Amino acid sequence: MKALLGIRWIKIPVFLLCLLPLVALVWRALSGGLGANPIEFITHKTGDCTLIFLLLTLAITPARRLLGLPQMIRFRRMLGLFAFFYGFLHFSTWIGLDKFFALAEMLHDVRKRPFITAGFTGFALMIPLAVTSTAEWIRRLGGKRWQTLHRLVYASAIAGVVHYYWLVKSDIRKPVFYGMMLALLLLYRIGAWLVRRPAPLRASASGTRQLTLAEEP
Ligand code: HEM
């Protein structure tokens, strides 16, 4: 497994796998398989993908530590960016197909409909994370500030789960399942924080803390 994760081009098949939900959606759209309410279908699929990729991103740190596979870190940024990508498609579906760019109506929904407020918050929190996901931004911000900023991913995932929980009318099984997965991932971090102090961060010549993409969150 270690050898497989270490292969230089392994990111390519992983990237293609992450694209599969979109390919399936486009395929369904072209073959008339989106059902009686295509907008609802697209909204639900892209919403699901956003949450799943957010959880997968958060699962990388515990998985690499528990499985002893530090190489898994190579996929975290890609998974996070796919969460943002599907979130963007989800949000765009709402803006363009659901609301037809009616700004007043959208603002009204964001203010007055709690599940939209939560979803909007979740997506808004992902924007600075996507923008600053590059090594260049880690350098620019400095490891400590970058790490603090990227803890927003926890708030984004919580907002996403709350959004889902608030929008379902009766069958709460799926949002509760996602909520439990998120709770486990957050509990792991709290546990890790309680049992040991963060690993000493390497001090650079200038005394600023250095952070590689291999560290938290
Ligand atoms: C972190 C960001 C977000 C996540 C994780 C997320 C996730 C989800 C999920 C999982 C669903 C339900 C999918 C299903 O039923 O299978 C959903 C539905 C929906 N989301 Fe989001 N969402 C996010 C942001 C947003 C934003 C920004 C908007 C619009 C402002 C939005 C609007 C909607 C709407 C309208 C629905 C369908 C509601 C219904 O069927 O009544 N979401 N979202």
Image (cartoon, helix red, strand yellow):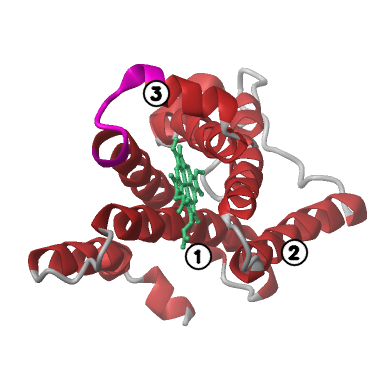
Looking at the rendering, the stretch of residues picked out in magenta corresponds to 97-104
Q: Earlier in the sequence, mark 1 or mark 2?
A: 1
- Give the Cα separation between the discs numbered 2 and 3: 37 Å
Q: Is residue 102 magenta?
A: yes
Viewer-side label of 1, 2: 2
Q: Position of residue 117 (x, y in %)?
A: 57, 32
At label 3, the amino acid type is Glu
Q: Position of residue 87 (x, y in %)?
A: 40, 45
Q: Is residue 34 or residue 195 the one in the foreground?
A: 34
| Residue placed furthest toward the bottom | 1
* The label number, if any, that marks residue 105 in the structure image: 3
- Give the Cα separation between the discs numbered 3 and 1: 43 Å
Q: Position of residue 13 (x, y in %)?
A: 26, 70
Q: Is residue 35 magenta?
A: no
Above-or-below relation of 78 to 106: below
* The label number, if any, that marks residue 184 in the structure image: 2
Q: Quadrant of residue 174?
A: bottom right
Above-or-below relation of 74 to 6: above
Q: Residue at x 57, y 50 (%)?
A: 167
Helix, strand or loop at label 3? It is helix
Above-or-below relation of 202 to 189: above
Q: Disc 2 vs disc 3: Cβ atoms closer than 8 Å?
A: no
* The label number, if any, that marks residue 190 in the structure image: none
Q: Earlier in the sequence, mark 3 or mark 1?
A: 1
Judge left or right: residue 111 versus residue 31: right
| Residue 113 visible | yes
Q: Disc 1 vs disc 2: Cβ atoms closer than 8 Å?
A: no
